[in-house]
Amino acid sequence: MTQATIRAAVLGASGYAGAETIRILQRHPHVEITALTAERHAGKPLGAVFPHFAALDLPDLVKIEDVDWSTVDLVFCGLPHATTQEVIKDLPAHLRILDLSADFRLKDIETYAQWYGHDHLAPELQKEAAYGLTEIYRQEIGNARIVAVPGCYPTASQLALIPGVKHGLIDADDIIIDAKCGVTGAGRAPKEGSLFAEAAEGIHAYGVAKHRHAPEIEQGLSAAAGRPVVVNFTPHLMPMNRGILATCYVRLEGGASAEDLHKALDTFYADETFVRVLPYGEVPATRHVRGSNNCWIGVVADRMAKRAIVISVIDNLVKGTSGQAIQNLNVMYGFAEDTALEKVAMFP
Amino acid sequence: MTQATIRAAVLGASGYAGAETIRILQRHPHVEITALTAERHAGKPLGAVFPHFAALDLPDLVKIEDVDWSTVDLVFCGLPHATTQEVIKDLPAHLRILDLSADFRLKDIETYAQWYGHDHLAPELQKEAAYGLTEIYRQEIGNARIVAVPGCYPTASQLALIPGVKHGLIDADDIIIDAKCGVTGAGRAPKEGSLFAEAAEGIHAYGVAKHRHAPEIEQGLSAAAGRPVVVNFTPHLMPMNRGILATCYVRLEGGASAEDLHKALDTFYADETFVRVLPYGEVPATRHVRGSNNCWIGVVADRMAKRAIVISVIDNLVKGTSGQAIQNLNVMYGFAEDTALEKVAMFP
Amino acid sequence: MTQATIRAAVLGASGYAGAETIRILQRHPHVEITALTAERHAGKPLGAVFPHFAALDLPDLVKIEDVDWSTVDLVFCGLPHATTQEVIKDLPAHLRILDLSADFRLKDIETYAQWYGHDHLAPELQKEAAYGLTEIYRQEIGNARIVAVPGCYPTASQLALIPGVKHGLIDADDIIIDAKCGVTGAGRAPKEGSLFAEAAEGIHAYGVAKHRHAPEIEQGLSAAAGRPVVVNFTPHLMPMNRGILATCYVRLEGGASAEDLHKALDTFYADETFVRVLPYGEVPATRHVRGSNNCWIGVVADRMAKRAIVISVIDNLVKGTSGQAIQNLNVMYGFAEDTALEKVAMFP
Amino acid sequence: MTQATIRAAVLGASGYAGAETIRILQRHPHVEITALTAERHAGKPLGAVFPHFAALDLPDLVKIEDVDWSTVDLVFCGLPHATTQEVIKDLPAHLRILDLSADFRLKDIETYAQWYGHDHLAPELQKEAAYGLTEIYRQEIGNARIVAVPGCYPTASQLALIPGVKHGLIDADDIIIDAKCGVTGAGRAPKEGSLFAEAAEGIHAYGVAKHRHAPEIEQGLSAAAGRPVVVNFTPHLMPMNRGILATCYVRLEGGASAEDLHKALDTFYADETFVRVLPYGEVPATRHVRGSNNCWIGVVADRMAKRAIVISVIDNLVKGTSGQAIQNLNVMYGFAEDTALEKVAMFP
């Protein structure tokens, strides 16, 4: 791969995932943004929907149908599900695609149909899509034309759990993931539940036992376990903008101790740029990764015998969405994996 | 008991628990506040430490040693642990006591010594202290001279779990309590971790596997189970002032379903004023009980077989501290149990 | 006036003003809520739109056309402007009305037309409407059939400024009101600008030099000055739920000092239950009135010669909306003015 | 100037200003951090006081007396006032200094003594200190050995006002600055007023008519006006981490209109990298500059005749402190002025 400039389009530039992608891309030395789309805002400058970009020199927003694909090498797709499948299957074949939606994450199109309520609209493309959890599927990602960027919760959960499951240190049939996410996870669509007055100064669980990230997490853990597993995944809405914290309660297997689990995680991620396993017994805070592409993981022994607690944190908009997409871009084009990505949080 | 006026003293009036106690007491028709203490602020009016009380006609702050106990019938004690035991054991015997600290909550003084790092200083008084979880120990509370008001986390956790454990619907050896609390839970002492800039826009777990509320929860669940149990209790700090949400992950026992568990809870609390079990499958939010003395509980079936999720919410300063203390006062003196207490949240 | 029970309807019960009205009314000993309306939610229980009311025994939501007015004495009207005029002009004449909208606040219907973009739809009713700033217009309110409850900003601003203007201590032609309000001021309609992710962790001014509360403030100050005045009014959106703080910059007139202004305010409000003038030189915080019907006012001398700073705070949903409405209800029916209203803030 | 590596020390690395300086410096291609000091934390790694830095390879914290100055070219001084003067006057003469404290900002040592309560301890050094408001004093800064980095409020205020005063478009004797700042402005010292529970969900003014940034602002505006001026400066504490918004109320002079003032500002800053004047009539939000070194300024005509409103926003920790310091570093050493500094906000 040469260090030539990659020409990128961002579809769905008026949402938070689109904005975060642009924020990171604009400092990538090898990427030029050549198209931005937003159906309802076509014709406006990006600064009209996101004033903080007003001073940048970027293309105006257009409709997808008006993009000149000959000026594009790579597409970031931040569209709603279902729409995504329809749009992507009609894109020219020379384009590589980083899809931020859920549309190509589930390998099994029947599981997709069951959780999303309609048949998959691009089953052929599904077969060639790599799952973009960089630390786990780096090889496939490098060679893929289409990469399905994982969900925010599945990123935090799988990075915390896959090594232990893979090494047989964790009972894959007794995993509880109590996850907490900031309000940006709900997107920019004006919904009553996302209003400041509804989300501030209070917390609640939502989508209990039926959140669509559950099958995605189970897909990854099943692959690690080598057999189908079902887990508890319970998300909660937090009064903050950014951040996911996944508190994972696990039963240790095969005589392993919590220290053994810690050591396995530490070894597994020893060469990674963005994943850091804290010293045994320490736990991470979301604010310590805010704005960065980091995932920090802590392991503590439970007071209950043969159990441990694994806690992981990420910024849901960075490692949980746009940052991981750009990490994948770096892998796909052979750039240094941390190009344009922060490794130090903006704190406070 | 007559409806005569009870003369109350609040020890430790410069902390949040003291303030919340005063806020509620000042609208209690049968209570008069006759003494307020705050060691470092003795001599000042209460408005000097809590400006929002400046317009009230209340006694000035004094040192504990300067209280004229002949003007007092009932003491709210909001002092640090250990200090509390020393102060209470020297109080005149005519006083009834509602202790907001942890000092008289643990029946077993060895467990106390183990978790608090020093011998219990008033073991004789410990024997006569009732545990003030009103819905569970109403009878003992009514007759007690000393009532140990439960901790905020133990209140939310035990109300959610005791009925199921008591009726054998929950496996008491496989309980995970993932709890989340607002920053007022940390008190008013200026600590770096409680600063706005440290606590806002981020979350973290703390005291993992070693928080002092764990033995208190276990004491209550052991009593319900009829044998000693150990549970997982993992607290998290939330960027909000008030509220606790306890997400309890339980294994169902004896062939019970999640609906059975829901029904048992609903029946158990059917006559309670402040505890409400939501319709099956619904979950509560802390903002729906903020400022009230309510505890709301929801039950949902887990996707994992034979498991359920029980979620309870309270306002940590009201049902979790001062409100429950005054609920106990009402029981002790034969007032209507909801006197001076809110049943409707202040939302938004 | 007897202490008989007043039967109240709340129109627009699914908004924040409606909810706050219900929250306060449900503890009013002389009011019974007999009808609740919400057009889009007709047929549902109130708990379906505001879960925190789910445990109360209240009438279900209906459409306005389905209210049985024979069961109603008093109407709280929390509808959008224009709609309000149309609805109110068709109500039976036996009803007394507390209007929470802007529709009857401006005495001059041409000013109304200019700022609201359409002709006044009930000019006859406008003539009989009293302006419900209780401390200033108590007499008219007591006798009125229709009371226009003032806007939140105009309440905080006028209470701070009217005494000084009326007594000629302030130059009415050089008044700057820098006002700050929490997000509930924007209502519950899902708008992008009210989303948590847009409103948290940041501030901005809005409606600069064109906010519709400006003519309302000018109407009150003109009346006090005895001549038309124009003022600066600049509102800002704050990342909090409740509270208004109005920082008023004034030029002292006629040789008055800041102390003179303070003394005049203090005297003016000496007998008021809810308005408190702080000791000279002290300034109030919104959190010290949160949840209460209080307005607290502070006066400080400016470093610039012959100028002073007057700062007032209220809870925008209470004294700024529903609390003041119920204060007016108490005046209209001869109840103690503080019936059902808090005088102590919920802090923290 | 060559592009050689500058070796920097950060004194007071355990405060927010120190942390923000390190955060920005660690991505500066021409700066190496060779020493970090924190008196109470000497001997610890930086990650012990700021966990988000734990993964970086940085020198451990030491006491100032233990720094080997031969390894240092440039000192960032983030110490308390008075201490700063004592420390700086004893530093070796080869060091260049960027002082983040207030100690060298006021040219007149008598004004310093009056506002800070003690005589200036390094009056000789005061004479050679440049005032580091980059856009205004770039020339002096480039040649200075000691640069006093302006306060956060003075930065936002002066950038908004100096062009208008300098060009005679604003009456320098009738300026009101209503300023609002996030809680990080109060620093990391554990103070009751900075606690989450005290600062969240509420606002208040503080230091009214006596804040120490007033004389600093007046110094700058007096220089622009060519005569001594006194202004109103009223700061308010906001429930957010980062951001300053200064709402400046000005009287137009010499027949100038608000458009004229806008045009003058626009022209004045036309070539600046970080200062942006918005289109006439638009106003900025702090969230649109968060994390960046930008200052955005808006101008609106007042409804009051011959008056205008100028609103400026900055991130108080970046352009208001550490970012401006590093902007000055870039000027002092001839690097591109935006090296290591962000021009796009982190939003949301």
Image: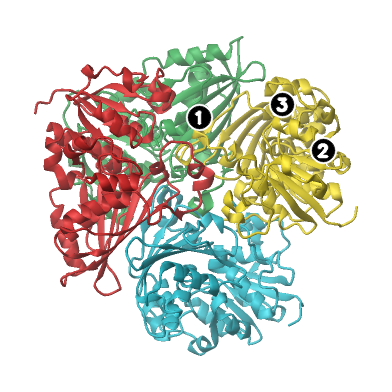
Chain colours: A green, B yellow, C cyan, D red
Residue C139 drawn above or below residue C291: below
| Viewer-proximal residue among C190 and B181 | B181
Residue D77 sits in quarter: top left
Q: Chain of mark 3?
A: B
Residue D88 visible in this rendered orientation of the protein: yes
Using the numbered discs, state the Cα–Cα distance from disc 2 to disc 1 in whole angstroms.
50 Å
Using the numbered discs, state the Cα–Cα distance from disc 1 to disc 3 in whole angstroms.
33 Å
Quarter of the image with the N terminus of chain A in it: top left
Given the current orientation, which residue lies at the most extreme top position?
Answer: A255
Q: How many marks?
A: 3
Residue D103 placement, left or right of D224: right
Q: Chain of mark 2?
A: B
Judge the density around disc 1: few (<14), some (14-19), many (≥20) Cα neighbours within 10 Å: many
Residue C233 placement, left or right of B38: left
Q: Which residue in the protein does label 3 denote?
A: B215
Q: Which residue in the protein does label 1 denote?
A: A217
Residue B267 placement, left or right of A17: right
Mark 2 or 3: the one toward you: 2
Residue at position x 65%, y 42% in the image: B38
1 and 3 marks on the same chain: no
Q: Chain of mark 1?
A: A
Residue D307 drawn above or below residue C49: below
Measured from the top left, where is residue D317 in percent x and y? 33, 40
The secondary element bearing badge 1 is classed as: helix
